[in-house]
Image (cartoon, rainbow, N blue to C red):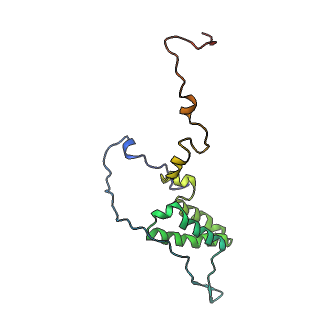
Amino acid sequence: MAGMGPAPKPEGRKARRNKDTIPQTVLRWERAEAPELPDFRIEQGGQLVEFVWPERTREWWAMWIESPQADHFGSSDWQFLLDTALIHARLWRGDLSAASELRLRVAAFGATPADRARLRMVFAEADGADQGRGSSGAPSARERYGNLRSISGGQSAPGAST
């Protein structure tokens, strides 16, 4: 995928310690409420007709409003996502050429597990929900192998050939 290289390393793990040549800009954060999908008219056959959002796009929009990511969206994020909703509507009306642009846009918001990993997003509740066992619920490696000890000093395990 063009323009998507590996995520940068955390500051403490970088080999080079020189400062960034471009200073960081710190912005004041203001959470914004999600807008409703707007009513508007489009030109069709020389006349203005009411645009009807596909039901699938309405469901998609509701999903984004309820997503954990939405807690971190500002007004410009919602406006970008609103424009993305129009692309989503095009796709669900059969315009398959909209698919690649839609994929790129929703990736910026962490739509898939791979997108969230690249953006370094994690779900906080996941850590406590599985008691640190991972998503499968199986015992961790430490629980399975915690009592194993290495044999040193030239001793071999019982039954092992030397």
Q: Quadrant of residue 64?
A: bottom right
Query: Split into 4 quadrants, where in the image is the N terminus?
Result: bottom right
Q: Is residue 25 left or right of residue 116?
A: left
Does any portion of residue 122 appear in the rendered image? no
Q: Is residue 128 left or right of residue 92?
A: left
Above or below for 51 versus 26: below
Q: Is residue 116 left or right of residue 45?
A: left
Residue 34: percent from left, percent from top: 50, 71
Toward the viewer: 45 or 52? 52
Toward the viewer: 54 or 90? 54
Toward the viewer: 59 or 127? 127
Residue 75: percent from left, percent from top: 44, 71
Query: Split into 4 quadrants, where in the image is the C terminus?
Result: top right
Q: How many marks?
A: 0
Above or below for 74 versus 13: below
| The residue positioned farthest toward the bottom in the image shown | 47
Does any portion of residue 87 appear in the rendered image? yes
Above or below for 34 versus 140: below
Residue 2: percent from left, percent from top: 53, 56
Residue drawn at the location 33% of the way across and 61% of the way down: 26
Q: Quadrant of residue 105?
A: bottom right
Residue drawn at the location 59% of the way across and 45% of the way down: 135
Residue drawn at the location 57% of the way across and 71% of the way down: 85
Toward the viewer: 82 or 155? 155
Residue drawn at the location 63% of the way across and 80% of the way down: 52
Above or below for 126 versus 70: above
